[in-house]
Image (cartoon, rainbow, N blue to C red):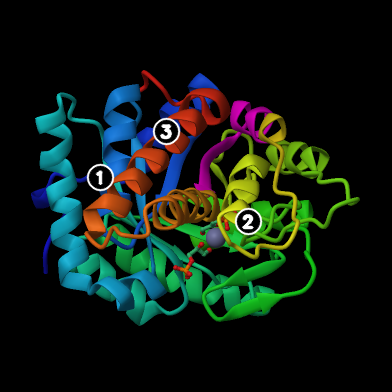
């Protein structure tokens, strides 16, 4: 058993309490490799933002669980070296079983999500409760989910949103003991959220209703990439073939971050930014074959994207 505390990581409890009071949200950025981790930490240190380093089960398979744990430990030291010991959470994104959550906790994660949103209400409660009981013995925080987002997450695909029912949240939170709750109010996973002509809208009215039922309880928004149109255009101008798509408007996320939303998940925008930078180098300098020559610019572009999110969307700058 490796305790996250020995790695210099923190759980999300105190970060969420401060975010709730301060009217901002903590960034939860997914990572699978070194360049993404460096970009996240550099962006957060430069803006003095706390951060949630988020690992999906797919990322865990891709990068290896032991390496990821050492990378998170390395991230703590890297932040100090860059000049600011920002609070860092290592979080399992979309855990789908008790065993996976337990295993992550034993490998040094400070926070886990148990995503029972595809189960029946009672099954979701039973599974989430089981994870909470284990996690809390180790002072690890747990995120549960009610409602189903549209889009693709790992291997699970949903065509339509099933909005969170505000009348269920109080009972769910009470019976599971979760520390935060992911809700479905119109955001969705992946780069294809809304088609051109559709009006993207997060249902802030449902969020307000949920807040009324569980005041001051940390809410999480998944699927919060904005699919920057300039980046999509850049990818396509360098030979990419991305379909037209619209993401979640940043001003709507800003409003949500001022409310009880304490954690905002962003992955796809980072993937787009890296892809744009890599395509640009490979097209403009076809003679290059040193990975540092295209992964370096990808890392720079990623860092700028994250800084923009922190300062202009989430408001978590200078909160570390
Ligand atoms: O919600 C899912 C995240 O974007 C992680 O994606 O499962 O492809 O690593 P992944
Ligand atoms: P995006 O696909 O919108 O970046 O969402 C990521 C996410 O919710 C990770 O859990
Ligand atoms: Zn998600």
Which element type, helix, strand or loop, lies under badge 3? helix
Whether residue 259 appears in magenta in the rendering, the answer is yes
- Residue 251: image location, x then y, percent: 70, 29
| Disc 3: CA contacts within 10 A as few (<14), some (14-19) or many (>=20) | some
User: Measuring 50% from the left and 51% from the top, which residue is drawn there?
Assistant: 276
Q: Earlier in the sequence, mark 3 or mark 1?
A: 1
Query: Taking 293 as reference, is 27 above or below it?
Result: above
> Looking at the image, in which quadrant does ligand 2 appear?
bottom right
User: Measuring 63% from the left and 40% from the top, which residue is drawn there?
Assistant: 230
Q: Quadrant of the N terminus?
A: bottom left
Q: Quadrant of residue 87?
A: top left
Name the residue tied to disc 2: 236
Q: Is residue 167 visible?
A: yes
Q: In this image, 74 relative to 194: left or right? A: left
| Disc 2: CA contacts within 10 A as few (<14), some (14-19) or many (>=20) | some
How far, Cα to Cα, is label 3 from label 1?
A: 12 Å
- Residue 261: image location, x then y, percent: 59, 38
Q: Earlier in the sequence, mark 1 or mark 2?
A: 1
Q: Is residue 224 visible?
A: no
| Disc 1: CA contacts within 10 A as few (<14), some (14-19) or many (>=20) | many
Answer yes or no: disc 3 within 8 Å of ligand 2.
Answer: no
Name the residue tied to disc 1: 38
Residue range in magenta is 253-265
**Marker count (numbered):** 3
Q: In this image, 291 relative to 232: left or right? A: left
How far, Cα to Cα, is label 1 from label 2?
A: 26 Å
Name the residue tied to disc 3: 304
User: Measuring 20% from the left and 46% from the top, which residue is drawn there?
Assistant: 9
Label 2 with label 3: CB-CB less than 8 Å: no
Whether residue 166 appears in magenta in the rendering, the answer is no
Q: Quadrant of residue 58?
A: bottom left
- Residue 82: image location, x then y, percent: 15, 29
């Amino acid at each position: 058993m490796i305790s996250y505390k020995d790695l210099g990581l923190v759980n999300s409890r105190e970060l969420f309490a401060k975010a709730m009071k301060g009217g901002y949200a903590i960034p939860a950025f997914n990572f699978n490799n070194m360049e993404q981790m460096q970009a996240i930490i550099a962006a957060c240190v430069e803006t003095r933002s706390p951060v949630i380093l988020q690992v999906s089960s797919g990322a865990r398979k891709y990068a290896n669980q032991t390496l990821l744990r050492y990378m998170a430990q390395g991230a703590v030291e890297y932040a100090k070296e860059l000049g600011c010991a920002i609070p860092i959470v290592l979080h399992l994104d979309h855990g789908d079983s008790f065993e996976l959550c337990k295993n992550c906790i034993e490998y040094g994660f400070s926070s886990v999500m148990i995503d029972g949103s595809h189960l029946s209400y009672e099954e979701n409660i039973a599974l989430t409760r089981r994870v909470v009981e284990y996690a809390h013995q180790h002072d690890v925080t747990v995120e549960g989910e009610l409602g189903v987002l549209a889009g693709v997450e790992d291997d699970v695909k949903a065509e339509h949103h099933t909005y969170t029912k505000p009348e269920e949240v109080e009972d769910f939170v009470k019976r599971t003991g979760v520390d935060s709750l992911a809700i479905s109010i119109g955001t969705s996973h992946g780069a294809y959220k809304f088609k051109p002509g559709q009006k993207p809208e997060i249902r802030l009215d449902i969020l307000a209703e949920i807040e009324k039922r569980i005041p001051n309880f940390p809410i999480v928004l998944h699927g919060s990439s904005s699919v920057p149109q300039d980046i999509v255009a850049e990818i396509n101008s360098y030979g990419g073939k991305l379909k037209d798509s619209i993401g979640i408007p940043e001003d709507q996320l800003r409003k949500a971050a001022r409310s009880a939303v304490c954690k905002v998940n962003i992955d796809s925008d980072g993937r787009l930014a890296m892809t744009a930078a890599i395509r640009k180098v490979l097209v403009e300098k076809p003679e290059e074959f040193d990975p540092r020559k295209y992964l370096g610019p990808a890392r720079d572009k990623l860092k700028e994207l994250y800084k923009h999110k922190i300062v202009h969307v989430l408001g978590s700058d200078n909160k570390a």
